[in-house]
Image (cartoon, rainbow, N blue to C red):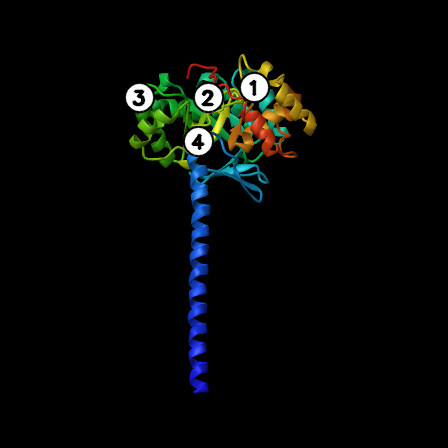
């Protein structure tokens, strides 16, 4: 009888343990579900309601499906190539001034150069790259086709290759939407297959334009380059693009024509800069990087070019990011 009683107690104990195990599993599952729901809510917010802090994982900052590595200062594109997350823009730089500016940038560690057919300086950019003494594969050059070239994109691509004279083009963008843009992009896809271009992208494409354009092409753009600065933040567009696995690059990161002086003198930005012992320009560029936006500030001033590279020895706090996010006016400077 005693043995039977012990067997019954043991059986009850096993049943209780099993039930507790199932309860623990249920609670763990419920907990995971709560976390997942919370993350989904954040994704929903970043998809349209406003910017949310990127997820920091070691040296990587994740925004949507895009990861910036702040140690290597690069991002892995969906094309399989790595691109620097900071560089120099060459709009308004021509001739010897362009050569000197790009050379200064390269000598200060910059490895990303942005040019375009409409900048009339592809030859100068190519000259600076060829004469730099830096291995070609270490430099990432972006150029663009303008809408007046879309009617004969094959010739335009060959023209860019000839003017740059650097062997291949790391990335080619369509400068902005226009008649024949799909056909021009398909021609760039052919150039990728031929080894003339490595990655493709778009400039001045927003949600509506992307929704119409993407179903008509074969190679997903690796990059979208749009106007982005504290007064025009694109908080609805950036997460949408990132969720597609496409990197985002900001032109006019310091405000461009009409906004630069005002931004650099902004009281909030100046206060944050003073805390970190940095310039207002450096704070603005760092803000962009922490939002997952690649920056290409332009300058012909050697001191400013050098200053624009010193972005990785400080970090803005969440509060500082929020203060700068509050500066958004949704004021787009250019007509694009």
Q: Which of 95 and 312 is in front in this view?
A: 312
Mark 1 surroundings: few (<14), some (14-19) or many (≥20) residues within 10 A: many
Ranked by sequence position, the earlier of labels 1 and 4 is 1
Q: Mark 1 points at which residue?
A: 98
The numbered mark at residue 180 is: 3
| Disc 2 from disc 4: Cα separation | 15 Å
Ranked by sequence position, the earlier of labels 2 and 4 is 2
The numbered mark at residue 223 is: 4
Question: Do residues under tags 3 and 1 come within 8 Å of each other at their CB atoms?
Answer: no
Mark 2 surroundings: few (<14), some (14-19) or many (≥20) residues within 10 A: many
Instruction: Give the structural element (helix, strand or loop) at label 2.
Output: loop
| Disc 1 from disc 4: Cα separation | 24 Å
Residue 135 sits in which quadrant? top right
* 269 relative to 57, above or below: above
| Disc 2 from disc 1: Cα separation | 13 Å
Q: Where is residue 305 in the image (x, y as percent from the top left)?
A: 62, 23
Ranked by sequence position, the earlier of labels 2 and 3 is 2
């Amino acid at each position: 009888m005693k043995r039977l009683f012990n067997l019954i107690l043991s059986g009850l104990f096993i049943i209780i343990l099993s039930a507790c195990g199932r309860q623990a599993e249920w609670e763990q599952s419920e907990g995971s579900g709560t976390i997942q729901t919370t993350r989904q809510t954040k994704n929903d917010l970043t998809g349209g309601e406003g910017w949310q802090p990127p997820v920091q994982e070691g040296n990587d900052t994740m925004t949507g499906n895009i990861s910036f590595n702040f140690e290597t200062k690069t991002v892995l594109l969906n094309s399989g190539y790595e691109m620097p997350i900071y560089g120099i823009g060459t709009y308004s730089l021509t001739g010897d001034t362009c050569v000197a500016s790009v050379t200064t940038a390269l000598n200060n560690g910059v490895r990303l150069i942005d040019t375009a057919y409409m900048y009339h300086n592809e030859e100068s950019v190519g000259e600076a790259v060829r004469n730099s003494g830096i291995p070609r594969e270490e430099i990432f050059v972006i150029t663009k086709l303008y809408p007046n070239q879309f009617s004969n994109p094959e010739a335009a691509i060959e023209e860019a290759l000839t003017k740059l004279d650097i062997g291949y083009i790391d990335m080619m963008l369509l400068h902005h939407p226009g008649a024949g843009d799909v056909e021009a992009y398909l021609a760039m896809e052919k150039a990728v297959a031929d080894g003339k271009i490595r990655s493709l992208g778009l400039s001045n494409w927003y949600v509506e334009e992307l929704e119409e354009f993407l179903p008509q092409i074969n190679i997903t753009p690796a990059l979208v380059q749009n106007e982005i600065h504290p007064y025009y933040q694109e908080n609805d567009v950036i997460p949408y693009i990132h969720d597609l696995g496409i990197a985002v690059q900001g032109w006019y990161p310091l405000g461009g024509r009409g906004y630069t002086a005002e931004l650099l003198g902004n009281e909030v930005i100046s206060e944050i800069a003073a805390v970190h012992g940095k310039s207002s320009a450096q704070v603005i560029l760092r803000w962009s990087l922490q939002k997952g936006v690649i920056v290409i500030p332009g300058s012909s001033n050697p001191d400013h070019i050098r200053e624009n590279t010193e972005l990785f020895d400080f970090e803005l706090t969440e509060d500082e990011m929020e203060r700068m996010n509050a500066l958004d006016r949704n004021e787009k400077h250019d007509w694009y």
